[in-house]
Image (cartoon, helix red, strand yellow):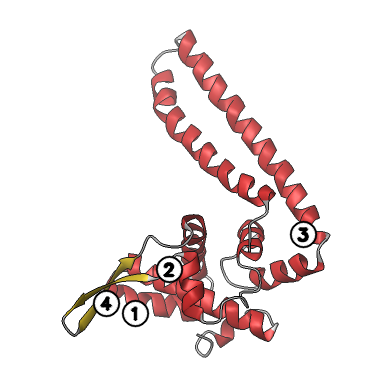
Amino acid sequence: MQCSPLVAVRAGFPRRRNQLRKQSRPLAAELLKNYPAPLVRVLTYFCDQWLELTQQIKKLDGEIQQETMASERLNRLEMLYRSAPGIGRVSSNELCRELGDLKQFSHIKKAYSFVGLTPSEFSSGESIRRGHISQAGRPRLRHVLIEIAWRSIKRDPGLHEKFKELAVRRGKKRAIVAIARVLVGRLRACCLAQESYRTERSKTVV
């Protein structure tokens, strides 16, 4: 699958807005002390850029929605993705275009590798140790799925319990990556079965 150009462009705008926020914070603190004209001009520029990016995001969201509504396949996939906990309109738009129905992956491990959620392995003699996730796969997808995983544990009691159990043994960072992998596996199962995600099935669908 290849991401829509509209979705790809839209994904970069929030990062640019965050950069503007980081740049403007120290200037705003200085502005509270005095009001030098050059500083006011710089902050005005940052504000204008922020508003412009916000308008562009709003416009792109409308165009992406039109693209989705015009395609029965995209519309169906978006509804399926949004049935999962932690997945909203923006992330579903990106996932359904990047991952499709996940049927192209003959094994779930191939899906993990594609999205960059495969743990690295270290071999020593007859033992194999698993470390942090490798840098293979698509960084943007990995980032999106990790964000979704953090939101999902607040909405799915089963995932929340699994996260707490893993966090005790492996730490929160590795635990949330494991939750992201679980979500990918469940989404693939939902796509194969052509049915929505159901929270009450969290203990049986893995």
Image position, residue 105 (x, y; %): 56, 77
- Residue pointed to by mark 4: 169
Residue that label 2 marks: 117
Q: Amino acid at mark 4?
A: Arg
Which residue occupies 50% across, 32% down?
Answer: 20
Asked if the residues shown at circle 4 and circle 1 are in contact, with their CB atoms under 8 angstroms apart, the answer is: yes
User: Most extreme residue toward the bottom, as rendered?
Assistant: 204
Question: What residue does disc 1 label?
Answer: 165
Residue drawn at x 51%, y 73% as measured from the top left: 111
Foreground of the two, 153 or 9: 9
- Residue 175, percent from left and from top: 36, 71
Earlier residue among tags 3 and 1: 3
**Which element is circle 4 on?**
helix
Q: Residue at x 41, y 62 (%)?
A: 136
State the SS at label 1.
helix
Nearest to N terminus: mark 4 or mark 2: 2
| Image location of residue 77, percent across then percent down | 71, 70
Q: Quadrant of residue 47?
A: top right
Q: Quadrant of residue 66?
A: bottom right
Q: Is residue 137 left or right of residue 127?
A: right
Instruction: Please determine whether, in this image, residue 115 is positioned above or below residue 41.
Output: below
